[in-house]
Image (cartoon, grey):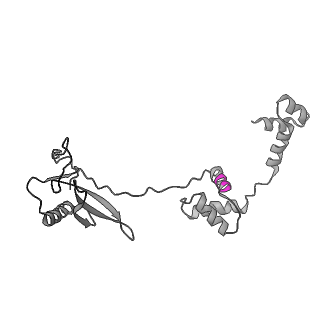
Amino acid sequence: MSTYQHIAQQAGQVPVRQLCQVLRVAPAAYYAWQRRRQVPAVEPAWQVAVREAFAYHSQRYGTRRLRVEVQADGHAVGRWRIRQVLEVYGLRAQQPRSFVPRTTDSDPAVCPAPNRLLGQPAPTAPNRVWVGDITYLPRQGGGWLYLAVWLDRCSRKVVGWHVRETMPEDLVSEALRRALAVRRPPAGLIVHSDQGSQ
């Protein structure tokens, strides 16, 4: 039982000001509590609109987008008040995780090749060391494309590349075949990539 509730119970036998003085409560605070209790619990239309818009958009809209929705319905309300309503009702916008494809698919059954670049100085001439990797590109209309690229470590130029909708081993080997056909490197070329299974 709160202090205010106790004062309300005893108010018939003891004056309210005396109860407030004994319990160290400001009489104005007690009367404000009484007024809040007596106000009918009719939810304002804008609060109903906030909760309905929140539910309609699958609990994904935050205060910015809810404000636009509610104001479009004719309710002049700002983000701060919308945030208060969401907090009172325990509503929190769910933020979906954006999907990021994984390009490294290490196979534990395959023994990785030794890193022949470790501790070596940077090459001083082109076509001595090529390094490769796979990245992903967003596709118009959704989905991803995968790009395998081989770079010359000295010149930092792309020597070969290939794009596909999936990431099979052929994605990397086709990019390497293209680079070898165009560049025709001398013997002793070091081809280096991460330890992905492709």
**Picture quarter with the C terminus:** bottom left
Q: Residue at x 20, y 42 (%)?
A: 118
The answer to whether residue 5 is left or right of residue 81 is right
Region of the chain picked out in magenta, as a range: 80-84
Coordinates of residue 76 in the picture (x, y in percent) = 71, 64
Residue 52 in picture, x, y percent from top left: 62, 63
The x, y position of residue 51, in whole percent, is 63, 60
How many numbered discs? Answer: 0
Q: Is residue 59 magenta?
A: no
Toward the viewer: 29 or 19? 29
Q: Is residue 81 magenta?
A: yes
Residue positioned 73% across, 60% down in the render:
44
Residue appearing at x 17%, y 54% in the figure: 125
Q: Note whether residue 13 is visible.
A: no
Position of residue 164 measured from the top left corner of the image (x, y, whole percent): 26, 66
Quarter residue 154 falls in: bottom left
